[in-house]
Structures are given as structure tokens and as C-alpha cells.
Amino acid sequence: MPADELRVLMVAPTSFFSDYGGHIRILEETRALQALGHSVTIVTYYKGKDIPGIPIYRTAPLPWRPDYEVGSSRHKLVFDLYLAGRAAQVAWRVRPHIVHGHMHEGALIGGALARLWRVPLVFDFQGSLTGEMVDHGFLDPAGRLYPWVLRLERFITGRLPQAILTSSGRAQTILREQFGVRPDRLFALPDCANLRQFDPERYPQEARMAVRRRLGLPLDRPVVAYLGLLADYQGTDHLVQLARHLRDAGHDIHVLIMGFPNVDHYRAMAVALGVADRVTFTGRVDYERDAPAFIAAGDVTIAPKMSATEGSGKVLNYMAMARPVVAYDTPVHREYLGPLGVYVPVGDVPGLGQAVVELCADPGRAAALGAALRRRAAERFSWTAAGNLIESVYRGLTSEKGAV
């Protein structure tokens, strides 16, 4: 191999690749590093889509759990035991210079491998472990288990990695103030946008209308679009409630909800609220083939995520597609959108409706905001720049260790 090539072992405790946020971050980081000449190998759970050009090693399936959905589950403990064993096998084959652990389980498994191979561990921090488990309804902050999980999180963040890549400035603040991580170990690496793939110039009005016909969307009404995971902590229930609010207020605006899982649950909610004819569910959307075109079908995009700790990478794709964005007012959304976002207090469904109505009624303002957001994405959130940052972190750690 070239003298300056780094061998990177990524530990991803998830079903890579699936078409949603955290997986897109892993995919784009890997491609950016490959473009710089580095070798990246990913170890992940047994489900997921293979990506040409990326070596992916998977665990064996659990005999009693051949199928599962994303999210927290008591079965993840066994998934991660399988993942640890598989990662150890792959590490022996790859002989990494760097172990790159995604999420806390990846950092925990990666930390053991990094010590075994005497190489640095980089932790890709995408949100607080305890915060996410509370958001997912899997952990009670007043329960007896909470202090133990918090202690584990402090061990993972404070003791194992030599560097932590954070998906937002808010995450850096949490790690410094709540977990006591030294600032010199923290490197801000926000989610970014693939500006070539998400290019609005490829979707003029005629192409957008063709996508609407393909999805069965109305051609004579504005469409507000969401693309991401479907879950209450993502605000999906608020999107269905938004459709009812718009109807009751006399506004003919259609709601396009794209993503998975729990599609049947939210479709039933739309039926119960009497807005099934005003909401379209697409199910899973292929990130590379369909996501740009489907986002382009919307006049306005929306980000109702309520988590205070997780990133919100979908917003970067909205920005790249030059769509105006209505978002709940969280630190992460403000970090991405800056002064160009249309913000609504968290949980305020009528506020979402008012913001959407105002943008749909003023296409000139909507277009100007979208164009400015595209420029902001190009200037601040490029995966090429992100790859250079990751490489510089790797180089600093491996030069200290004398690994390369």
C-alpha cells in the first residue's frame, strides 16, 4: 500500500447501509476518506444494503431475531456481542492504523480493539447515549437504571477515545460541561451535504411535476416535505397533526412524509384524524437514487425533530436542494440553518402551520431562502472539507503513536 495510506476500521453498531441520517454520515465519511487515498473497512450488523466499493463485514444473524427495526432494543446487547467478535476477526485481517467507532457501542467495542492493537480510537459522537435512550422512550430518567447507563456513557466518552468527532457544536458543549471531556480532544464535524448528488439544477419545474405525478401528489397545491426516520421523537406525529391543522384552518397544503419505520402506525393516525387524503407516505426512500428528486417535489421542507442532543442531517440535504426549511427551534437546527431558517418553538404545531402557510403564500421569499441555504451548505458543510478534517485528526494521532 502507499506509504501515506491509513487503514481504518470502522465499527458501526447499526444495520449499515439504510437510507437515513446516521448511515448517510458513515457513508459520506467513508467516501471522503477513500477519495483521499485511505482504506476504510466497515463492520456492522447483519442487515443492511451493500455499497459498491466499500468493504463491509457483517455479523451472523441472531437465530431468535432474524428481523428487526431500527432503534433501541433489549436485543441490541446480543447484536453488539456478535459485533465485537466479528470486529475482532476483521481487525486481525485489516491490521488497522486507526479504529473509528460510531455511536457509543462502536466506541466501546472499538476501544477494546484499539487497546489490543495499540492504535488510536476515534469516537464519532452523534448524540448522548442517555439522552437518545430517553428520547426513544427506552430509558426513564427517574428510573434505577439511568445512573448506571450514565456512568457507562461517562466511561466511554472520558476514558476510551483519543479524539471525538462531534456532529454539532451543541454536542461539544454537552461533552465538555456534562461529561468533562477535555476541549483538545474534541473536533467539530457537523453533518454535511453531498452537493453534487443533491443539486437543484437537475430538477427544473417540469422534472418536479413528474416526480409529483410519480408519487401521486397533487399538482395544483403546495407540498410540504419531510424525509427522515418516522418516530415521535422525530416529530412525525406532529406532521400528521399539521395536516389536520392546515385543513381546519382552510389551507389546501399537502404533507409529504418520506421514510421509515412505523409507516402503518402514522398512516393509521392520519386516517383517525381524517387527513388521509392530505398526507402521502412513501415508505423507505433510496438515498442515492430517489432522495434528491423527492425533496425537490416539495415547495417547503420541514424539520420537526425535538431531540436536544442528536444531529439533524436531513436539514443539510434540504439546504443543498435549495428548499426553504421550517424547523423546531433547537441549537442543532440553528447551527445548520443560521439566520436563514424559519423557526418555531418546539412542539408548536399551529406555529409550524403558520410558518408553512406564509412560505407557500410567498414563493419569492421561499426561493430566496432556498438559494441562500444552498450557498450556506456549499460554504460551510462540504464532505470534502469534512474528509480533510478527519484525515488531519488521524494524522495527528498516528504521528503521536508512531503508527505510520
Image: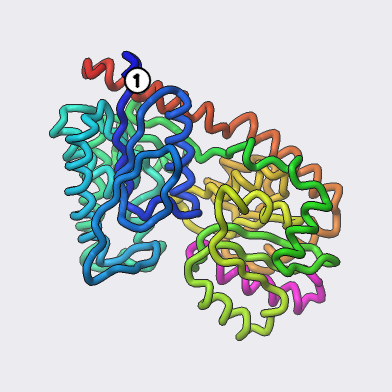
Say if 226 sits above or below 188 in the image. below
Q: Is residue 239 magenta?
A: yes
Q: Quick one: quadrant of the N terminus?
A: top left
Q: Residue at x 22, y 64 (%)?
A: 145
Q: In this view of the protein, which residue sits in the foreground, 146 or 197? A: 197
Task: Tell me: residue 38, above or below residue 251.
Answer: above
Image quadrant in which you'd find residue 75? bottom left
When asked about the image quadrant of residue 29, the answer is: top left
Q: Which residues are magenta?
A: 233-253
Specify whether residue 40 is in view: yes
Residue 329, percent from left and from top: 59, 53
Task: Look at the image and tell me in which quarter the C terminus lies.
Answer: top left
Circle 1 crowding by C-alpha within 10 Å: few under 14, some 14–19, many from 20: some
On whether residue 343 falls in the magenta region, the answer is: no
Secondary element under disc 1, as helix, strand or loop, is loop
Quarter of the image where one finds residue 69: bottom left
Residue at left offset 41%, top offset 49%: 50
Q: Residue at x 24, y 57 (%)?
A: 60
Residue marked by disc 1: 5
Q: Is residue 178 something one can see in this rendering?
A: no
Give coordinates of residue 238: x percent, y percent.
Answer: 59, 69
